[in-house]
Amino acid sequence: MRRSRCVSKAPSKFANYVMLLDAGEPSCYNEAISAHDYGKWKQVMQKELDNIYKNETWDLVPLPKVTKASV
């Protein structure tokens, strides 16, 4: 397989911008609960869930009997 030797770089119009790819935030629940600042993440997650319920974005329903919950 032949690969290009071109080096990709951002267009010059973006020279004065910085792109933040990782703000150090957890990417999943397990990372959040094992973080040193878990208390803050717990508050943020609870606030998000409260807003979801308040805005009626979705409803919590029981799992069908043929389904097994994954963690």
Image: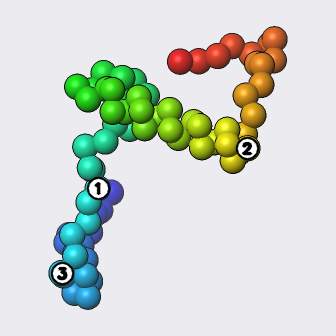
Residue bearing the label numbered 1: 21
Q: Position of residue 54 (x, y in %)?
A: 67, 42
Q: CA distance from mark 1 to mark 2?
A: 31 Å
Q: Position of residue 52 (x, y in %)?
A: 63, 42
Give the residue type at disc 1. Leu
**Residue 28 visible in the picture:** no
Q: Nearer the viewer, residue 54 or 24?
A: 54
**Residue 63 visible in the picture:** yes
Residue bearing the label numbered 3: 16
Does 34 sit left or right of 71 as displayed? left
Does 51 sit left or right of 18 as displayed? right
Q: Quadrant of residue 51?
A: top right
Sequence-first tag of 3 and 2? 3
Helix, strand or loop status at disc 3: loop
Q: Dot 2, how many residues are within 10 Å of its Cα: few (below 14), some (14-19), or many (20+)?
A: few
Sequence-first tag of 3 and 1? 3
Of circles 1 and 2, which is in front? 2
Q: Dot 1, how many residues are within 10 Å of its Cα: few (below 14), some (14-19), or many (20+)?
A: few
Q: Quadrant of residue 19?
A: bottom left
Give the residue type at disc 2. Glu
Residue bearing the label numbered 2: 56
**2 versus 40 height, above or below:** below
